[in-house]
Image (spheres, rainbow, N blue to C red):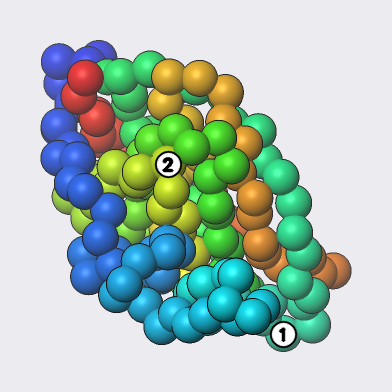
Amino acid sequence: MANLQDLQDLRVEPLTREAFAPFGDVIEASDAVRHFTINGGNTERYHDLANVEPGPEGKVIVSIFRGQPRSLPFVVEMMERHPLGSQAFMPLSGKPYLVVVAEAGEPPGVGALRVFLARGDQGVNYARGVWHHPLLALGSVCDFLVVDRSGSTPNCDEVVIAPAGRIPA
């Protein structure tokens, strides 16, 4: 592991639809999205919140990921991407978590990384090819409903970030 004193600090910013737009979709029930009443007035439907892409020859699957808590400061030494389809995460535990992303394209350097603090009622949908860090649950074990792609071709690329970045406490 890299020496913490030699790392570039990464700034954590709130997760908003506008700030996250280059990386995918924010999934949340808010007045900013299309919504309407259904089921005889008993339910509010927040409609079409994420562009789920299974990619060529893929199918959409639903899973639950159980993330172990991470401690801050946290060193970001790797990123991954899914070049064939999107990947959506919706927290089930109601706890905040961190999202580290970089735009799709060439493997990112530390300067291209963005860190968002997501509330426990906000999910994210990583667009196809967007670089992201695996789950960063905070404080306790957290479950996430995950909607992504299954298929016969590999769909995960990983890269080492050197020099690494640090999310401060």
Residue wearing tag 1: 56
Badge 1 crowding class, 10 Å Cα cut-off, few under 14, some 14 to 19, many 20 or more, is: few
In the rendered image, residue 15, in percent from the top left (x then y), is placed at 27, 53
Q: In this view, does 106 lie above or below 6?
A: below
In the rendered image, residue 85, in percent from the top left (x then y), is placed at 61, 72
How far apart in space, not on screen, are marks 1 and 2 (Cα)? 32 Å
Residue wearing tag 2: 120
Q: Do the residues labelled 1 and 2 touch (CB within 8 Å)?
A: no
* Residue 58 in sight from this viewpoint: yes
**Residue found 24% across the figure and 30% down from its top:** 167
Amino acid type shown at disc 1 = Pro
Amino acid type shown at disc 2 = Gly
* Residue 132 in sight from this viewpoint: no
State which mark lies toward you, 1 or 2: 2
Quadrant that contains the N terminus: top left
Mark 1 or 2, nearer chain start: 1
Between 128 and 164, the one nearer to me in the picture: 128
In the rendered image, residue 118, in percent from the top left (x then y), is placed at 34, 45
